[in-house]
Image (cartoon, grey):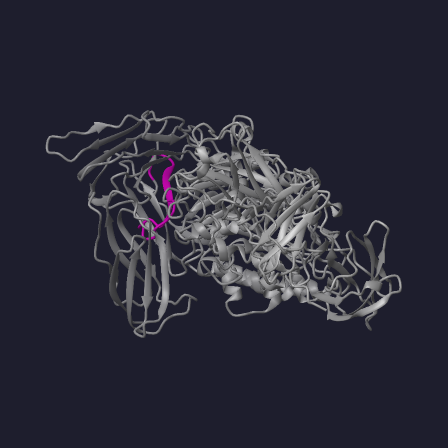
């Protein structure tokens, strides 16, 4: 019996996509040429007439037909262009090619390892392949079909048969290894595709025979080559499998196959003529039976493919389209006679993919005679009686992307880019915001999935298009953000849904569940399971929801970050047993300690489940409505509810009304992040509900386990709250770095699966805590008198730090008397250790009162301005003290008493670029000058600029003061609120070098001047880009030192990083903060990155700017 060897030829020869076409999939594109996409769903011969080309928009009168090219998967295909010899496209001319529908070849790249793919015959995403028609811009000819016509040589007899192949690919169910079987094991939690996953047939049960009937037309019983059977089975449970195979009506045993669990396995066996039932039409029926009889409780399996190879007559009676598989011929030439062949019959040799040859032969009556050359090896011929016109020919524009420029990539879908109200395109509107100053000045790039499918996956539907696009853009450098705007669905019935394109807008990678992490994991040198881009997704099918979310982001980012609620964190712990209730709460308490003692100095509130009921409702609306920066949940959950039930943000029953105060929600449980199955899931509802809910969601998307969830939670907190390098970083970068750190020391499958299944919903560039400096605040509601002494006043003062916490800082509190000439007299200064979030200070003093009535006093934080703060204007509280009998009467701003006529001077505070500067200090050529006028009068609130004068003298000998017109575009101001604090900002542009003098005079609404004379200060502008020597002061030091240096130039200097090493070269501390024009400083308390005090000795430091410039020096700790 001769072995049949032609059946696997197509798969073996097709090779890997990447191996042939390059890493990114767009290497074949010539951006100087025009392209037209041709969708193809089946193997056939396709023809386009000149008229078809003209209707699609191809300029047929100017295109030289010899330059036409056709590409499939980045490889040029041979085409036939009839009538091209005159180099014109005439009316009768046409283009013809052999096309194939989509298969699973690209899916191979989604498996780990790639060899785990069961078979390549069926795509997991679409039946549609794409061919791209173009014409060369250099005038050279395209690849052409070779046409062969030979007469019958003497002595060459007709081939009696060929080897037919009947391939059945079953696609009734998706095997998800092992979600459809009984007891799962660890690999269930891998989201990439692995062994046993893919489309397959119906699940078969133990001891129940499964029978399939095949009809084989043109059966040749007398052939020397005997038929063969190959079946691919797929395990569907965790047991050992034993499957028996039999054929024919008699049930002749073919053999058995042993395999385990969810593995796919092939079974091959020769068939005998007695296995077939020959019919009167010269066909034969074959019955195949399988039955499982493993020793375990279950033995479930399914049939994925059945391939039958058998000798078949060469005749078009066997079907109007066939693939003839010719056996090798020693002479290298084979002669065929095809009876019942109409004159329209077309024959192509398709043995070499992309290099089809057309065989014309001769027609004798109803018989086509053809000689096939090159048959020393097996050949495959496509014989068909029909030629198809493609259903579509669509113009495609391939954009030329610059990987070096964009750093904020947005991938969306045209469904979401439609007008909403007055907004023409909410996706591009969001991109415009991100590119603006308020949005962070990112270099944005918006692309659609259609663009990515065409350019990075050869026009085929697959998430690899996003992955290759990301890989390509990363060649321009790291640090890019990827924002996926649109729903993804891994619910595999959508594969066969006619509306799939509008249900799965921006695909993700993965099998039950999906994973956006895998879209970029392992690219650009990143570890295999670590995303190379900070990635977030907006899970929506609605353009309105895109607009709603964009409005929430603008509100979140444009509101002040230095407000107390941005340092509030809410912990929610669940559980379904007493041990879980205690254990989950303990996990969150461990995380709590990381928050309170480091850079945020947050206040953490914990709410815990109190019963072991499956679900316990909890009301957190009051806390959420007042504002929390972050909500962390640890417990049991599903996509629609947590065991500590907080409800849907959109449901009015739960009472949420937190407009402008949107938290990050960090869910650790099962499935709360499972956004890949459609429906109104809890997490997405919190994200997309307008004017309430959350700003971002980080949640596990499938079945979570306590240990890896605990590991990820604590590492997330360590990265965000205890590492100064990452504290103010965007949330997507925190997610990315947490994943890297978790997986850096483990290959545990559960840890990998857990990390892959953490899904970030929302903009990955959002910063939760953009707080580079402290911000101490005092408000009237936090100040009260605590005594009735006759000789002194004792105040209870609640101090709030709404900014960054620096444990080494010292905070001073002073009460001072404001004199009639505007000067002040201080009583004493109380020093306090730095406030992390909120603390109480007591201050006693004996007032020195004026004789004619209440005396104005000011309670001032950091009066010496030793601490650099985000906002220097909220450190003062004005109050009055008077003598009433033998006691002092204190009237605070929120008192209900009516004040006498306002006789007190307002407080004037002027800052430049966010700081009070020394006289003659350097400032930016484009400074921001802020004028704050604070008045104690609660009744006469300033609503305009009346009584405020700004004058500026430029740097020349004859220059005089020029009045700043407060109505110009470089000035903006905000009316005072109930605290009667008025802010005005003046932004002069492009100041030349020299010394300027600023003069400011202000009065309150009653006309009281801020001082006897105007405020006046000199400042210098230096446009030369320079960096001064850096000096630590003091040096040596015992408590803390400040590294001082000066920056000049026209542009904002970006960020700076100070790296401190010991004499062994080890990095002991890294400090990073934004720089400004003028004097800068880094504070260091002599501790390492973990806050541990370093030993005495000499340390070397290196200061580095973003542009690469650096300074070095030495510093000594001497305690």
x, y percent for residue 399: 44, 40
User: Residue 776 lies in magenta, yes or no?
Assistant: no
User: Residue 868 lies in magenta, yes or no?
Assistant: yes
Please state which of residues 615 and 458 is positioned toward the viewer in this rendering.
458
Please state which of residues 410 and 300 is positioned toward the viewer in this rendering.
300
Asked which quadrant contains residue 659, the reply is top right
x, y percent for residue 724: 42, 59
Asked which quadrant contains residue 432, the reply is top left
The answer to whether 798 is drawn above or below residue 713 in the figure is above
Q: Is residue 215 left or right of residue 396?
A: right
The stretch in magenta equals 850-871
What quarter of the picture does the N terminus occupy?
Answer: bottom right
Q: Residue furthest left?
A: 957
Q: Characterize the magenta stretch by its predominant secondary structure.
A: loop
Question: In this rendering, does residue 796 appear at all?
Answer: no
Question: In this rendering, does residue 966 appear at all?
Answer: yes
x, y percent for residue 749: 61, 67
Q: Is residue 240 left or right of residue 95?
A: right
């Amino acid at each position: 019996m001769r072995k049949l060897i032609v059946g696997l030829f197509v798969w073996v020869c097709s090779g890997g996509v990447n191996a042939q076409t390059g890493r990114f999939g767009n290497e074949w594109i010539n951006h100087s040429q025009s392209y037209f996409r041709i969708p193809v769903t089946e193997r056939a011969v396709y023809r386009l007439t000149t008229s078809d080309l003209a209707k699609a928009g191809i300029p047929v009168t100017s295109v030289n037909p010899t330059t036409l090219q056709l590409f499939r998967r980045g490889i040029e295909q041979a085409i036939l262009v009839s009538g091209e010899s005159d180099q014109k496209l005439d009316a009768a001319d046409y283009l013809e090619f052999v096309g194939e529908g989509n298969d699973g070849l690209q899916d191979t790249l989604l498996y780990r390892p790639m060899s785990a793919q069961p078979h390549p015959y069926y795509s997991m995403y679409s039946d549609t392949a794409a061919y791209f028609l173009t014409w060369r811009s250099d005038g050279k000819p395209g690849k052409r079909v070779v046409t062969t016509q030979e007469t019958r040589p003497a002595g060459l007899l007709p081939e009696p048969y060929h080897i037919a192949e009947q391939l059945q690919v079953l696609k009734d169910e998706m095997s998800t290894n092992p979600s459809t079987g009984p007891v799962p094991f660890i690999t269930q939690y891998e989201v990439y595709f692995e062994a046993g996953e893919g489309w397959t047939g119906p699940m078969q049960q133990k001891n129940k025979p499964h029978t399939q009937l095949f009809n084989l037309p043109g059966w040749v019983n007398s052939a020397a080559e005997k038929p063969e059977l190959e079946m691919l089975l797929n395990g569907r449970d965790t047991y050992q499998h034993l499957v028996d195979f039999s054929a024919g009506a008699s049930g002749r045993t073919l053999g058995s196959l042993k395999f385990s669990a969810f593995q796919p396995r092939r079974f091959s066996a020769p068939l005998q003529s007695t296995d077939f039932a020959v019919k009167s039409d010269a066909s034969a029926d074959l019955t195949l039976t399988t039955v499982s009889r493993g020793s375990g409780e279950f033995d479930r399996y399914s049939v994925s493919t059945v391939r039958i190879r058998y000798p078949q007559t060469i005749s078009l009676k066997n079907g109007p389209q066939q693939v003839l598989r010719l056996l090798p011929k020693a002479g290298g030439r084979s002669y065929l006679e095809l009876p019942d062949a109409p004159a329209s019959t077309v024959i192509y040799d398709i043995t070499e993919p992309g290099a089809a040859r057309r065989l014309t032969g001769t027609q004798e009556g109803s018989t086509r005679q053809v000689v096939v050359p090159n048959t020393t090896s097996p050949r495959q011929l496509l014989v068909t009686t029909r030629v198809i016109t493609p259903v579509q020919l669509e113009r495609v524009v391939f954009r030329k992307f610059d990987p070096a420029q964009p750093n904020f990539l947005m991938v969306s879908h045209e469904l979401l880019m439609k007008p909403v109200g007055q907004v023409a395109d909410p996706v591009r509107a969001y991109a415009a915001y991100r590119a603006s100053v308020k949005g962070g000045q990112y270099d944005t790039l918006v692309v659609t999935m259609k663009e990515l499918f065409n350019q990075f996956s050869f026009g085929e539907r697959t998430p690899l298009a996003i992955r290759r696009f990301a890989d390509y853009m990363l060649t321009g450098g790291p640090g890019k953000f990827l924002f996926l705007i649109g729903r993804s669905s891994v619910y595999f019935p959508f594969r066969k849904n006619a509306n799939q394109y509008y249900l799965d807008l921006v695909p993700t990678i993965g099998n039950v569940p999906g994973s956006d992490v895998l879209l970029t994991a392992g690219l650009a040198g990143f570890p295999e399971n670590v995303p190379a881009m900070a990635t977030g997704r907006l899970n929506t099918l609605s353009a309105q929801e895109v607009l709603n979310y964009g409005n929430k982001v603008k509100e979140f980012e444009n509101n002040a970050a230095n407000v107390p609620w941005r340092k509030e964190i809410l912990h929610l712990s669940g559980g379904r047993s007493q041990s879980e209730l205690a254990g989950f709460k303990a996990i969150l308490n461990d995380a709590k300690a990381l928050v309170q003692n480091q850079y945020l100095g947050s206040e953490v509130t914990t709410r815990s489940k109190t019963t072991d009921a499956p679900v316990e409702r909890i009301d957190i609306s009051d806390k959420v409505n007042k504002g929390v920066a972050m909500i962390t949940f640890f417990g049991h959950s599903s996509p629609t509810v947590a065991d500590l039930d907080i409800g849907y943000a959109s449901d009015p029953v739960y009472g949420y009304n937190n407009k402008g105060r949107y938290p990050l929600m960090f869910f650790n449980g099962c499935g709360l992040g499972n956004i890949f199955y459609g429906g109104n899931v809890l997490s997405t509802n919190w994200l997309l509900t307008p004017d309430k809910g959350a700003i971002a969601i980080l949640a596990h998307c499938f079945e979570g386990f306590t240990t890896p969830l605990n590991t990820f939670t604590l590492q997330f907190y360590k990265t965000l709250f205890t590492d100064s390098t990452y504290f103010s970083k965007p949330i997507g970068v925190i997610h990315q770095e947490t994943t890297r750190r978790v997986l850096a020391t483990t290959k545990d499958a559960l840890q990998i699966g857990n990390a892959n299944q953490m899904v970030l919903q929302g903009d990955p560039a959002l910063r939760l805590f953009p707080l580079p400096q402290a911000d101490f605040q005092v408000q009237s509601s936090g100040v009260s008198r605590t005594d009735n002494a006759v000789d002194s006043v004792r105040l209870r003062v609640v101090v709030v730090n709404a900014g960054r916490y620096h444990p080494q800082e010292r905070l001073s509190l002073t009460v001072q008397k404001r004199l009639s000439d505007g000067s002040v007299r201080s009583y004493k200064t109380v020093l306090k250790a730095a406030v992390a979030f909120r603390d109480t200070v007591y201050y006693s003093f004996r007032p020195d009162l004026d004789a004619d009535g209440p005396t104005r006093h000011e309670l001032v934080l950091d009066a010496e301005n030793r601490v650099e703060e985000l906002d220097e204007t909220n450190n003062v509280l004005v109050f009055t003290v008077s003598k009433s009998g033998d006691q002092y009467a204190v009237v605070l701003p929120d008192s209900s008493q009516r004040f006498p006529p306002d006789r007190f001077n307002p407080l004037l505070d002027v800052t430049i670029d966010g700081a009070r500067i020394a006289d003659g200090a350097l400032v930016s050529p484009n400074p921001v000058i802020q004028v704050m006028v604070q008045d104690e009068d609660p009744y006469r609130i300033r609503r305009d600029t009346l009584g405020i004068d700004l004058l500026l003298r430029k740097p020349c000998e004859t220059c005089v003061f020029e009045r700043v017109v407060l109505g110009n575009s470089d000035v903006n101001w905000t009316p005072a609120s109930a605290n009667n604090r008025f802010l005005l900002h003046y932004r002069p542009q492009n100041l030349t070098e020299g010394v300027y003098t600023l003069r400011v005079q202000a009065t309150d609404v009653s006309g009281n001047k801020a001082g006897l004379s105007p405020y006046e200060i000199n400042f210098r502008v230096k446009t030369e880009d320079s960096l001064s020597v850096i000096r630590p002061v003091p040096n040596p030091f015992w408590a803390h030192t400040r590294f001082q240096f000066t920056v000049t130039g026209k542009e904002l200097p970006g960020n700076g990083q100070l790296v401190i090493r010991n004499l062994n070269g080890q990095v002991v501390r890294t400090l990073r903060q934004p720089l400004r024009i003028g004097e800068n400083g880094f504070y260091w308390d002599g501790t390492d990155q973990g806050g541990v005090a370093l030993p005495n000795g000499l340390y070397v430091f290196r200061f580095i700017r973003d542009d690469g410039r650096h300074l070095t020096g030495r510093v000594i700790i001497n305690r």
